[in-house]
Amino acid sequence: MSDKQNTEDFEEVLDENQTEATSESNIEQEELSVEEQLREDLAKEKDKFLRLFAEFENFKRRTSKERVELFKTAGQEIMVSMLPVLDDFERALKEMAKSEDKEMFKGVELIRVKFRETLKSKGLEEVDAEAGDVFNADLHEAITQIPAPNKNLKGKIVDVVEKGFKLGDKIIRHPKVVVGN
């Protein structure tokens, strides 16, 4: 064999080895890229899952809070509709106090107390407002202003026309008052 042919054979073997090495390298890169692709897909899915889980937790927390608020004020509509009845009891007792039939007065008083205690057990509370208290626009509803009978009542409550009530922390009816100016 000549040197030229040996060189050509050697070059052929080298080319074949390089081709095999290149194809093996390409296969490894493809495998790595497939593996990397799968890792990226897994990371995306994990991120998507975590976001969905966090969103669900926020939903549960929000609906739980809304449910608690609903239970707190579930009876608000009924309570508001019962307040005029409570007012009527107050007015009836004032008129009955003028009559001589004390037994009927005691009977109506017992019914009023029971009714008031039942509403109180459901969370109804009276908003304190008395003559001489400082007027607060957040708590009281001024229905009129009159000249103050004395200087001490200027800017203060002169008379309470209608009692106010709150259910829990929420005022459901502001006390209607007369303010001195």
Image: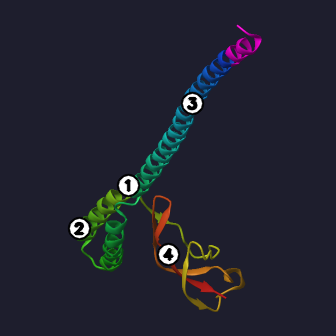
Q: Position of residue 169 (x, y in %)?
A: 50, 60
Whichever of labels 3 and 2 marks the residue nearer the N terminus, that label is 3
Query: Which amino acid, by three-letter code, is at mark 3?
Result: Glu
Which residue is most to the right?
3
Q: Position of residue 168 (x, y in %)?
A: 46, 58
Identify which residue, 119 or 4, lies in the foreground.
4
Q: Which residue position is annotated with label 3? A: 30
Whichever of labels 1 and 4 marks the residue nearer the N terminus, that label is 1
**Is residue 158 covered in magenta?**
no
Magenta span of residues: 1-11
- Location of the N terminus by quadrant is top right
Which numbered dot is residue 71?
1
Is residue 168 left or right of 146 when viewed as pictured?
A: left
Whichever of labels 4 and 3 marks the residue nearer the N terminus, that label is 3
Of labels 3 and 2, the one closer to you: 3
Q: Which residue position is annotated with label 4? A: 175
Q: Which residue position is annotated with label 2? A: 103
Task: Compute the Cα span from label 2 to label 4.
Answer: 31 Å
Q: Position of residue 21 (x, y in %)?
A: 64, 20
